[in-house]
Image (cartoon, coloured by chain):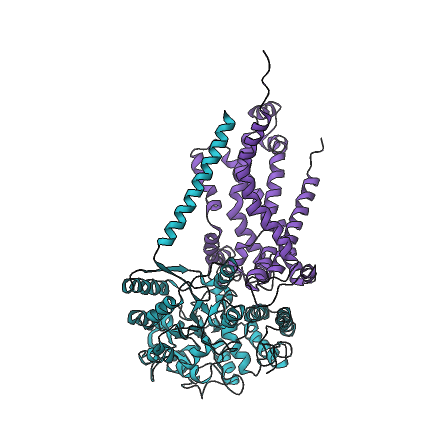
Amino acid sequence: MSATLGNRLLKSLGAASALSIAVGAGLSGAQAAELKVMFQGDPYEITIITDVAKRFEAANPGTTVQLINTPHDAYNEKIGAAVSAGSLPDILQLDAPFLANYVWSGFLQPVGNLLDKALVDDMTASNVAQGTYPIDKALYAIGLTDSTVALYGSRKQLEELKIRIPTSVEDAWTRDEFEAALKTLSTAPGVKWPLDLFRSYGSKTEWITYAYEPILVSMGCDVIDRTSWKATGTLDGKACVDAATEMQNWVKQGWVVPQSAGQNQFYAEGRPAALAWGGHWFYAEANAKMGDDVVVMPLPKFGEKGVSPNGTWIWSVAKTASDPAAAGKFLSFMLQDPAYRDAYKAHAGFPGLKSFAAASPLYADKGAMAVAFEQAGKTAVARPPHPAYPTITLAFQNAMTNIFDGADPQAELSKAAKKIDDDILDNDGYQPFGKAE
Amino acid sequence: MPRRKPPIWGGRLQELGMLLPACILIALFLLLPFLSSFEIALTNQRLIPRPVPVRFVGLGNFQQILTDSAFWTALWNVTRFTVMVLPIQCGFALAIALLLNQKLPFRNFFRGLFFLPAITSMVVVCVIWSTLFQYPTGPFNQIVGFLSFGLVSPIDWLGDPTWAMPSIVLLSAWQAYGFQMIVYLAGLQNIPETLYEAAELDGANAWQRFWNVTMPSLRQTHIFVLIITTIQAFKLFTQVNILTQGGPRGTTDTLVHYMFTAGFVDQRLGLASAVAILLFLIVLVVSLVQRFVVRDRR
């Protein structure tokens, strides 16, 4: 009796599951076109993107947009997991320096023909550069914005201490001037740390490579040689070791805000940090607290010339996208949406489109961030556009973190260089990158 | 009356039918991934598929891990963590369990209250504690300054190589002791009241009753708690990933964090799988040794 009950139960279970599969298949077949969009951002950006998706849905009945908001700190890990699970969304936002790796791995498709031509023509040179794959020279991603890092200070404090305030990229502080300023500020009343390098962003974001690599490049070295694609001999060379030693020295002197002190020391009460080595997005925060006293200066010239970073989160279309044309349509709609642009403008978004730059008084001539925009045109150096970038940045971040924490610069940089070269070897040189031209 | 023969095959089939769903799920989600991680560990497989063919590298991954000083640092850190967290977490759990086993007013309320950290997400706990640990003006530093009359200067809890691990230990013990507390509470309630009454008649004071009645009666509970806590401790990851990312200078890097970085940041799935297997073997050996040491000698 009980045996037959068991059998019957099993049978009915089987029937039920077969039925549910059939129903599921029927439903998905009948569903309208859906665009899956994976992105990251702070709460403000999430609202902007959610709103623009709603407007797109209203303008395009029959198409729904499913937004997949993914935490910034684990974003690249999530992409990796999605690729290996075969569950990549149609549109994905990505951090510009990782583009070469993703295109080389073969899961993105060129977007040049999917987007409105006017939009592509409107991109700034830096924006085009960050979205272009160096091998086939095709455009794989686009963004409304770009980014840079500037040096922020208090006009009142600098003037009181008779520290010169540079006003253009050409008369940026030299290495000696920068160190003299740090020294003067270190003994100024109320100053606990002369410099905030935003170590509190931690090593889970791109910050370390993004914001500190320009110091290396300005001092005449780099994280990897950009023609032979070898790190040994460059990253562990004398110029880089000198640069790293110098930065370590700032920390040793007690000049740099420690990692555990948070991100607000520049404008916190009593202004414990005098200068801030901060992204363009930091201006809005600092300006809100300090008003016109915030002065924006170009990054110092450590060597012959100053160098600044660029690149930001840009939009791409997966090769597996079910409807690439619809994906392109969504991106064109979003990037041209006036409310979307206004929202970024209100948050000091750094222009990556010429028309957006023209409409952003903050970055125009005489705007508070004019010098930051000038810098992007004159001294920006992109992070190495090479498929080994995930390893390059991880190795460099670990090395820099350890060096800041007191490790031997030469030993750490040698270890990082070896790690990068090992990875390139392990991938057979990332052909066709390794080929001699 | 002739005995009815039990329906051998019908019964077996039914048993099998009952077992099947669980077996399939275990095989699919536990056994299969475990076996495939052995396979992946012997290759140079990447997280993201790439144009370079996947190669069989034999024990190359294991060789690379075992010669990497960061791996040994991670193992040493996890050992340090376990040795520190075991007595604190279990001692605290036992003390609270003893307290909550008394006939106090609002006993159930307090039981719930003390269990609260255990059901709070570790991520949330970490975010809150990072504020407590903040340098130089966080609450902990203010307490230290107040208690020492300002003589002790603020401590960079998570940024100082000597303090980072103890800070993580403290946080972890606080978050997780609830589970051990519940187990101890159950163990305490299993001790017959008569044993205490007999001890009292023999003139044993509270201290003697604890050492001679409570502790021996909790023997099996101790063994269970010890092994479970050790296994948990070896898996230390979340706190480190959120608060220190293994720093400063690798003093809080752990085996799982090492594995995570290798697999998801460095994208080397083969290497990460090899770490997973090593971690499994290490935990297995540690548990076996513990079982052997604390085995019942009767």
Q: Quadrant of the N terminus of chain B?
A: top right
Q: Position of residue A67 (x, y in %)?
A: 38, 60
Question: Which quadrant: the C terminus of chain B?
Answer: top right
Chain B display color: purple
Position above or below: A257 against A10: below
Closer to the camera, A229 or A324? A324
Q: Nearer the viewer, residue B218 or A79?
A: A79
- Say above or below: A161 vs B149: below
Farthest-out residue, right: B297
Q: Position of residue B222 (x, y in %)?
A: 61, 38
Q: Which chain is cyan?
A: A
Visible in this render: residue A8? yes
- Give whichever of A417, B158 is nearer the camera: A417
Q: State the image coordinates of residue A15 (x, y, percent, origin top left).
A: 44, 39
How many dots with numbers? 0
Q: From this viewpoint, which residue is outermost toward the top?
A: B1
Of A63 and A83, nearer the camera is A63
Residue B84 visible somewhere in the drawing: no
| Residue A63 image point, x, y percent | 33, 61
Is A404 on the left-hand or right-hand side of A287? right
The residue under the point 59% across, 40% down is B225
